[in-house]
Image (cartoon, grey):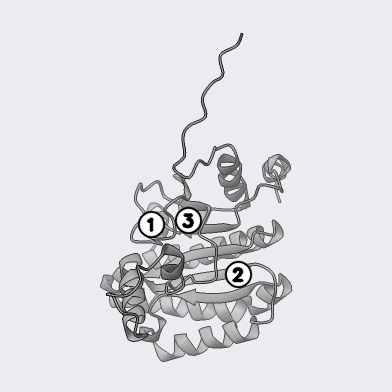
Amino acid sequence: MNRRAEELLEQIDMSALPRHLAVIMDGNGRWARRRGMPRVAGHRAGTHAVREIVEGCAELHISALTLYAFSVENWKRPFAEVSTLMSLLKEYLAKELETLCRNNIRLRTIGRTDELDPTVREELLKTIADTSRNTGMVLTLALNYGGRAEIVDAVNRILSNGRKLSGEPMTEAEFNKYLYTSGLPDPDLLIRTSGELRISNFLLWQIAYAEIFVTDTLWPDFDKKCLYEAIIAFQKRERRYGGIEPQLVPSR
């Protein structure tokens, strides 16, 4: 860890960390283009940032980390690029299993993973099973994921379970149980890299009250220093959850 990262780490209030941190990992293509490299080189470089942030969050004892790895819209990309992304995913799972276990991290996925290639699903299921007894941070990979698709899937599960729309009104807490993220707290902090000011169909229901931190840093360059900066910014904000802003008390 470099000196600047150490200085930032010392500024973090360990009693006020986000319980759940979600990340939109953006900028791999631009990172590669600026270096005159093919887009796939940016995706490969991005896996190093994944390792850095997963380890960084585990070291801070953050309860949950969710990474937006592959969206339902990403199928529109060129076949070669999609194939590379899937190969990198399998490679990451195979290489990082030991690291996940060493850091007591449990893996899970959200999204329509049944539509992924069988070899990808096989590697995912193996890693999920091999980390299932870990009791530390929950690392969730959003794969073939879309926020709108998640809500539609939740409604369809409700209907398939025989829940009558004409019955008792459904509460938010009950609806939460049908989402992919059931069992996880809602994200407290959403980080988006590459400077884009949009949420790209990510965790639409869950980020209702999340603090959003946008950085111009492209994902392959995102490291622990950047993570610490985001957490420090989060800790400086006053979270009101829609409540009334605090009023200044006039001096007497």
Labels 2 and 3: the sequence-earlier one: 2
Report the front residue among 239 and 159: 159
Circle 3 packing at 10 Å, graded few (<14), some (14-19), many (20+), is: many
- Check disc 2 and give the amino acid type: Val
Q: Mark 2 points at which residue?
A: 138
Q: Mark 3 points at which residue?
A: 219
Quadrant showing the C terminus: top right
List x then y, in percent, for residue 208. 42, 53
> SS class of the residue under badge 3?
helix
Labels 2 and 1: the sequence-earlier one: 1
- Residue at 52% over, 66% down: 47
- Check disc 3 and give the amino acid type: Trp
Q: Is residue 24 left or right of residue 237?
A: left
Report the front residue among 1 and 100: 100
> SS class of the residue under badge 2?
strand
Q: How far apart are marks 3 and 1 (CA)?
A: 17 Å
- Residue at 56% over, 79% down: 93
- Residue at 60% over, 65% down: 51
